[in-house]
Amino acid sequence: MVVTSNGEEVQAQVNPKYDRKSELKDFDDSKTGVKGLVDAGVSKIPRIFICEKNQLDNISTTSSVASQFSVPILDFEGLDGGAAQRGKIIEKVRDACEKWGFFQVVNHGIPGNVMGDMIDGVRRFYEQDTEVKKGFYSRDATRKFKYNSNFDLYEAPAANWRDTFACVMAPQSPDPQELPAVCRDILIEYSKHVMRLGLKLFELFSEALGLNPNHLKDMDCGEGLLVLGHYYPACPEPDLTLGTSNHADSGFFTILLQDQMGGLQILHENQWVDVPPLPGALLVNIADLLQLITNDKFKSVNHRVLAKNVGPRISVASFFRTHNHEGVTMRVYGPIKELLSEENPPVYKEITVKEYLTQYYKQGLDGTSKKRHNSSQKSNGIEEEAQFKPEYDRKSELKAFDDSQTGIKGLVHAGVTKIPRIFIHEKSQLSDTSTTSFVASLRNVPIIDIEGIHGSSAQRIEIIKKVKDACEKWVFFQVVNHGIPTCIMDDMIDGVQRFHEQDTEVKKGFYSRDKMRKFLCNSNCDLYESLAANWRDSFYCNTAPQPPDPQELLDECRDILAEYSKHIMRLGLLVFELLSEALGLNPDHLKDMGCAEGLYVIGHYYPACPEPDLTLGTSNHADNCFFTILLQDQMGGL
């Protein structure tokens, strides 16, 4: 489905006299952060916080998505008991890291009162006397404790509605006198607990990778700890900004403690999914450096926080990585050699933590990856920066995409957040995509009930009249009581889904552009001819006049494809009769012309698209045959 906004413009964004730099500096110089704006009673957010429309896409769709997806919840009780129990937990950790990149943990060992006191400590810091708090306001990266609003204030396209304090707790903890009195004791206490849990997680991650428990710790992955205390005040215009922009975390992984306010969303299967707070739980998410050293086995997933008109929301993010400790930040990290093979070559280049963090802070939270891919090993077969290169080579990008043989499903599986340029359509092709809801309320495609078509002549004549009217005025109509059992239709939809979601290497065996094959799959039959590729993968099966050998079909959909084709052929022959009679001809006229001799079945798969306003699932076209019978799921979009 193509989801578009209402097209409203924020007038401030077109003011040519607007001086963004001055507004940023004035806000920063106040040293009071977003809370200062709220305390001053602002009813409209300053322009520096207003996000581009595409950054705010789909912020209202998560309730339906939340019912489909739930972040895994892992129970660590019994972790240090028997080997069998530990093995089960490790298996769940592996599954969550590979498929989600996020999971919640209960029975993790950190007392509930410590977590509650930590949330209260963050609140006390932000709600203390403003002049005392100003003494900690800084952008000096060498300070062990500092507070400010938006670490990337001057780099980000838009500021976030959030204030943050940052404290480097390891490898060298700060002098207690460097910490604010209102949260000093609990910050030290909580950090000790979270470090113990973090080291335990490094063991589980190591074992989940098939390595010895100390492997990641021996690589010094667990040496650093950076604790951030976030404060998200209530926002007067939450639809115009974000609490935290779309991003993936720096470091190896993050342990997040949050209050019960909610607002966190993660990008899963290109859908923004709510992460409802679970009392007593901690959220763990894989970060960029762990994805890098596991060579993409564990996934660092993009996430964001919505702004809300209630608050404050408080969270504590503990990042396992070094910060400014030079001896450690110069260490080189690359894919772990024990995880590599001829079939699994290194996807990423080696990088030092210092190099990675320099790039991270330079770019800010812009939703893009800071990891460096090996030029010869791109997970999706596409150069991510291609659409921004002035010397853009469309032919090469088309070929790279086609040669990957993984289709759009492969791009989605690789976690793309921006569509490759070959999929971007001209503005004229996308015109009026936002007007359909209004039009739909005025007109509806005809629905024809063909029950009784073989009954009395009067019933048949009435049905033929409706078919004639629909074909002349609409050229589309929907049919009910057509004789194909619902279970057959449902099984066919499931069969298409199974085919496209099966093991990638198995599916590649059917990838082809050889039109002589009875069964094949690819992405965009006109990939090299069209002005822009469509966001759709398809399989094609020529089932008549000569059906394919069953061995040419995949196990995942062989039986249902054969069964559905029999039913659809019977319905098609009936439709040819009705069309003939609607033309005033004898019922067999079109069949006698050989019109009904062939049947071509196409199974389309439209993955969720990260930028639906820039492309189409299928371009504007008319079908190249006598007629088409379309079976579709409940997603909509046609």
Image (spheres, rainbow, N blue to C red):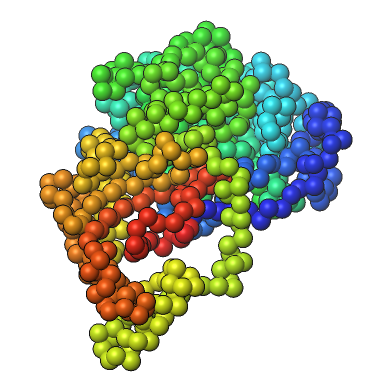
Q: Residue at x 18, y 53 (%)?
A: 558
Query: Compared with residue 201, is residue 408 higher up or lower down, i.e. above or below?
Result: below
Q: Nearer the viewer, residue 534 or 133?
A: 534
Q: Position of residue 252 (x, y in %)?
A: 46, 25
Q: Can residue 415 be seen?
A: yes
Q: Position of residue 98 (x, y in %)?
A: 35, 36
Q: Can residue 91 be seen?
A: no
Query: Compared with residue 608, is residue 595 higher up or lower down, i.e. above or below?
Result: below
Q: Is residue 360 left or right of residue 608?
A: right
Query: Compared with residue 136, is residue 498 higher up or lower down, i.e. above or below?
Result: below
Q: Residue at x 58, y 71 (%)?
A: 441
Q: Position of residue 516 (x, y in %)?
A: 23, 42
Q: Nearer the viewer, residue 381 or 193?
A: 381
Q: Is residue 95 left or right of residue 390?
A: left
* Figure quadrant of residue 126: top right
Q: Residue at x 66, y 23 (%)?
A: 145
Q: Is residue 356 left or right of residue 555?
A: right
Q: Residue at x 16, y 54 (%)?
A: 547
Q: Position of residue 295 (x, y in %)?
A: 37, 24
Q: Nearer the viewer, residue 367 or 638?
A: 638
